[in-house]
Amino acid sequence: MVARAGSRFLTPADPSAVPFTDVSGLSAEAQRAIAVCFENGSVNGKSDTVFDPYGYATRGQAAKMTWRLWENYLSSGQ
């Protein structure tokens, strides 16, 4: 949702550049969305190499993603 909401102002990213080892079984669209969010600082993952794509986001994590999306929007000048 974050990648789609920011599609006009977030920097595109290469899915092969993300350090997460547990996203390779996901669809290409999901991998691109994770890469965009990671590249733009909206998500970090559970650890340096684990994203946990089937895990639940906490309220704090959702707030952080929303805040960083807002910061990226403001810095884009749109």
Image (cartoon, rainbow, N blue to C red):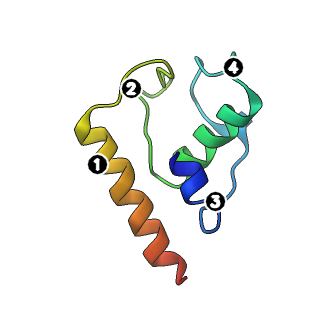
Give the residue type that dot 4 points to: Ser
Whole-angstrom CA distance, mark 3 to mark 2, is 24 Å
- Could you classify mark 2 by the number of other residues whose Cα lies within 10 Å: few (under 14), some (14-19), or many (20 or more)? few
**Labels 3, 2: front one:** 3
Residue 63: mark in rendering? 1
For the residues labelled 4 and 1, the Cα–Cα distance comes to 26 Å
Q: Are marks 1 and 3 in contact (CB under 8 Å)?
A: no
Question: Mark 2 falls on what kind of element?
Answer: loop
Q: Residue at x 24, y 38 (%)?
A: 59
Gap between marks 1 and 2, in whole Å? 16 Å
Label disc, if present, on residue 46 of the rendered structure: 2
User: Residue 24 has which mark?
Assistant: 4
**Label 3 – label 4 distance at C-alpha:** 22 Å
Q: Earlier in the sequence, mark 4 or mark 1?
A: 4
Quarter occupied by residue 21 = top right
User: Quick check: 25 above or below 20?
Assistant: above
Q: Mark 3 points at which residue?
A: 7
Residue type at mark 3 is: Ser
